Amino acid sequence: MKTDILLAMWGALDNANQATKPYSFRLPISIGAKIDALCEMYPQRNRTQLVADILNAALDDLERTLPHTLGEEFDPEALGVEDFVSPDEPKRYHIQGPRKEFRRLADKHYEKLEAELKLPISSFLYGDLVMTKDSYGKK
């Protein structure tokens, strides 16, 4: 998510599930002042929501910049999902490198956090870990 989308999000309702354990951080006062300013500017959002949105945007940007390479061609038949792949779609390839590792670990922890909330495992954050040659290198 790009940070310029945050302003639109802050005017919308938030139905996101929250983790069961609190995360506590000490921040530099300059960051605290900026967060407090946003809380005053967007009173319909609480501090937790604002910080979560900002972190989400920053982590999405960070994930897009993690190094990666294209690996083997993705075979939908091996996963039994060939019915969901159109023959007109470009070929997709497994990704390799730090971006793949981040996505794999994020999926692992997402599944663990959903289990702690006793939610049915609905999906993963990233899932298939593939991309097309056209999307390779795009941030």
Image (cartoon, grey):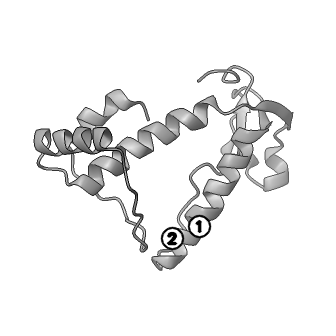
Check disc 1 and report its element: helix, strand or loop.
helix
Residue 40: x and y in percent read 11, 43
Q: Circle 1 sits on which residue?
A: 111
133 to 118, vertically: above or below: above
Q: Residue visible at 24% across and 53% down? A: 47
17 to 115, vertically: above or below: above
- Asked where in the image residue 72 lies, by quadrant, the reply is top right
136 to 81, vertically: above or below: above
Residue 107: x and y in percent read 62, 57
Q: Amino acid at mark 1?
A: Glu
Q: Nearer the viewer, residue 90 or 137?
A: 137
Q: Residue visible at 73% across and 51% down? A: 81
> Is 127 left, or right, of 121 in this rendering?
right
> Is 95 left, or right, of 110 in this rendering?
right
Q: Check whether the beta carbons of the residues at disc 1 and disc 2 lie within 8 A of each other.
A: yes
- Asked where in the image residue 32 lies, by quadrant, the reply is top left
**Mark drawn on residue 31:** none
Counting the numbered discs, the total is 2
Please identify the quadrant where the C terminus is shown: top right
Q: Circle 2 sits on which residue?
A: 114
Is disc 1 surrounded by few (<14), some (14 to 19) or many (20+) residues within 10 Å? some
Examine the rendering and report whether any part of residue 11 can be seen. Answer: no
Q: Residue visible at 66% across and 48% down? A: 103
- Asked where in the image residue 2 lies, by quadrant, the reply is top left
Please identify the quadrant where the N terminus is shown: top left
